[in-house]
Amino acid sequence: MSERCLIIGASGEIGSATVLKLVEAGYRVGVQYHSNNRVVESLKKQVPAELWEGSYQGDLSSSKGIREFLSILPASWDAIVFSGGHLWKGLFQDMEEGDMDALYHVHTKAPWMVSRHVLPNMIRNKRGNIVVVSSIFGEEGASMEVVYSSVKAAQIGFVKGLAKEIAPSGIRVNAVTPGLIQTKMNQQLSEEEWRSLEEEIPIGRAGTTEEVANAVLYLLSDQSSYITGQTIKVNGGW
C-alpha cells in the first residue's frame, strides 16, 4: 500500500506543486489549507480518488486555531510536509505584535504541534518522514523580512534538533530552502527588481515550484534513506 503524506499549506503554489508531485509518485495525500478552498477543490479533481486522503481546514496563525485543527486531524500519517507560506514585508520597527505572532504560529509553533501530534504513531511504526519547506532567508536573513527570516531560521533549528532525537526510531527529518521562486508571492517585484535578482543567481533564473517539489519528493523517498537533519538548498547557487 502506498504511503500517506499530509501536506500543510497545500493551497499555496509550492504546496500544490508538492501534492501533484507526490501523487505522481504514488503517494496518498491529505491536504491542509486555511481559506483557499477553490485551490483545494481543483487539486482534488486532479488526484485519483484512491489517492485522496481528505482535506482539512485550519487557521494555523494562532494557538487556538492550531488546537482546533489538531482536533480534526487524524494522527496516523507516514510522512508530513510543511509548506505553509505566510509573509509580512516591511520595516521591522513598523511591524505590529499581532503580525509577529501570526508568523511565529504558522512557521514555528504549527510545525512543533503538528509534528508532536503525528510522531507517536510514527514512533510505534518505527518509520516516518518529515520535510519542512523553509527559505533561503532562514539561512541568510533578509532586510524588510526580519521576522520572517527569524521564524524560517527557527524551522531549520527544529529540523536539526528533531532529526537527532527521533533518528533511532527510524524517522527522518529534513528541510528544503528555496531561493527566488516563480510564485504569486513574488509578483510584487517590479520587472527591474526581478531582472536584478536573476542576475545575482549563478544559474541565471528564478526556480519553479516543481523544482522545489522535486527536492521534497527526493527527501521523502528511499533514495535519501541515509539523509536526516539536512537542508537542501534549491536556489540556483544564489
Image (cartoon, rainbow, N blue to C red):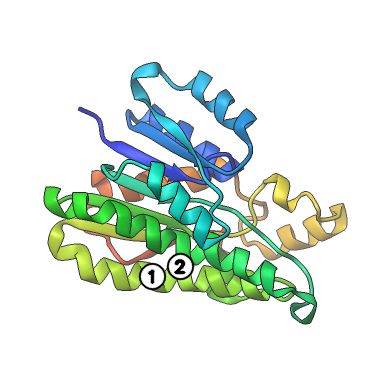
Q: Residue at x 23, y 45 (%)?
A: 222
Identify the image quadrant of the N terminus: top left
> Do the numbered discs 2 and 1 sit on residues whose CB atoms are within 8 Å?
yes
Q: Position of residue 65 (x, y in %)?
A: 52, 54
Residue in view at x 79 percent, y 62 percent: 196
Disc 1 crowd, CA 10 A, few/some/many (<14, 14-19, 20+): some
The residue that disc 2 covers is 155
Residue that lies at the very extreme toward the bottom in this rendered image: 93
Check disc 1 and give the amino acid type. Phe
User: In the structure shown, which secondary structural element does the residue marked by tag 2 occupy?
Assistant: helix
Q: Is residue 117 above or below residue 230?
A: above
In this picture, is 140 found above or below 131? below
Find numbered disc 1 in the image and state the secondary structure of the residue it sits on: helix
Q: Which residue is mark 1?
A: 158
Tell which of 48 and 212 is nearer to you.
48
**Foreground of the two, 104 or 204:** 104
Above or below, 116 against 216 in this view is below
Q: Residue at x 71, y 64 (%)?
A: 88
Q: In the figure, is residue 119 to the left or right of 194?
A: left
Residue located at (21% from left, 56% from top): 171
What amino acid is found at the position of numbered circle 2 in the picture? Gln
Between the C-alphas of marks 2 and 1, the distance is 5 Å
Asked where in the image residue 51 lies, by quadrant, the reply is: top left
Taking depth in this image into account, of 112 and 170 the one nearest to the observer is: 112
Tell me residue 95's x, y (percent).
75, 74
